[in-house]
Image (cartoon, rainbow, N blue to C red):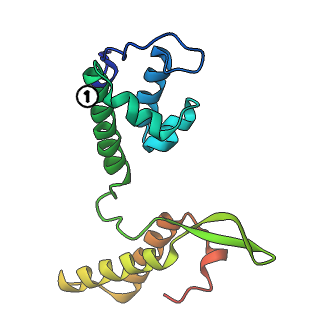
Amino acid sequence: MDIPDFLRFTPVRLRAQRNGWAPRLQLRFIIALARGAGIGEAARSVGKSRQSAYLLREKPGAESFARAWDRAAAFARTTASAHHAPAAGMVGIETILVPRHYRGRLVGFVLREDVAGAMRVLGRLDRLAERLGGGDDLRAYAERFEAFERLTGAGIDSVDRIRL
């Protein structure tokens, strides 16, 4: 397996300091950027500040580090966009974050399926079927129900309240 371009860099040469940007910290910072962390988050993951990361980038001899930084950020953007790209025909079917409150304060989030998005997709499928010639109504409802069941992973007990 070939080493990614963003890992091929020359660490910035600095005086040896107990709390400095050692070469291993520079590498961990670049890896954190490639994993999709923001600059501040990546710096905090190695025990440094965002400002010190920018100061390191501007030091003389940091050109290789700056290129690695840019390449790692570009890599994270491309993988994030590929990861979040919806599958063909699956637009609108995703999970949504529902906020949870306790005594008036936000305490967290719960992932829920987007049933409304699933129903929008099913409606589009119905309109497409009508334009293509349709079929008898019973078969269309059966296919619609099977598609809904596949999309949500729900059984008949949880779907009986939804009006088809």
Left or right of residue 86, residue 142 in this image: right
Pick the quarter of the image with the N terminus. Answer: top left
Q: In the image, residue 54 lies at what x, y percent? A: 39, 36
Residue with the mark numbered 1:
67
In the rendered image, the vertical position of residue 27 relative to residue 15, given as above or below = below
Q: Please tell me which residue lies in front, 61 or 7.
A: 61
Q: Quick check: 161 above or below 10?
A: below
| Of the pair 103 and 99, the residue shown nearer to us | 103
Q: Secondary structure at mark 1?
A: helix
Query: Outermost residue, top direction?
Result: 16
Q: Residue at x 27, y 85 (%)?
A: 127
In the image, what residue type sits under mark 1? Answer: Arg
Residue sitting at x 65%, y 75%: 158
Quick one: 100 or 20, which is closer to the camera? 20
* Residue at the image position 55 percent from the left and 14 percent from the top: 17
Residue 140 figure quarter = bottom left
x and y percent of residue 86 in the render?
34, 58
Please state which of residues 98 and 49 is positioned toward the viewer in this rendering.
Answer: 49
Q: Position of residue 11 (x, y in %)?
A: 37, 16
Please tell me in which quadrant of the rendered image residue 5 appears: top left
In the figure, is residue 3 to the left or right of 50? left
**Residue 34 visible:** no
For label 1, count other residues whose C-alpha is less than 10 Å away and answer few (under 14), some (14-19) or many (20+).
Answer: some
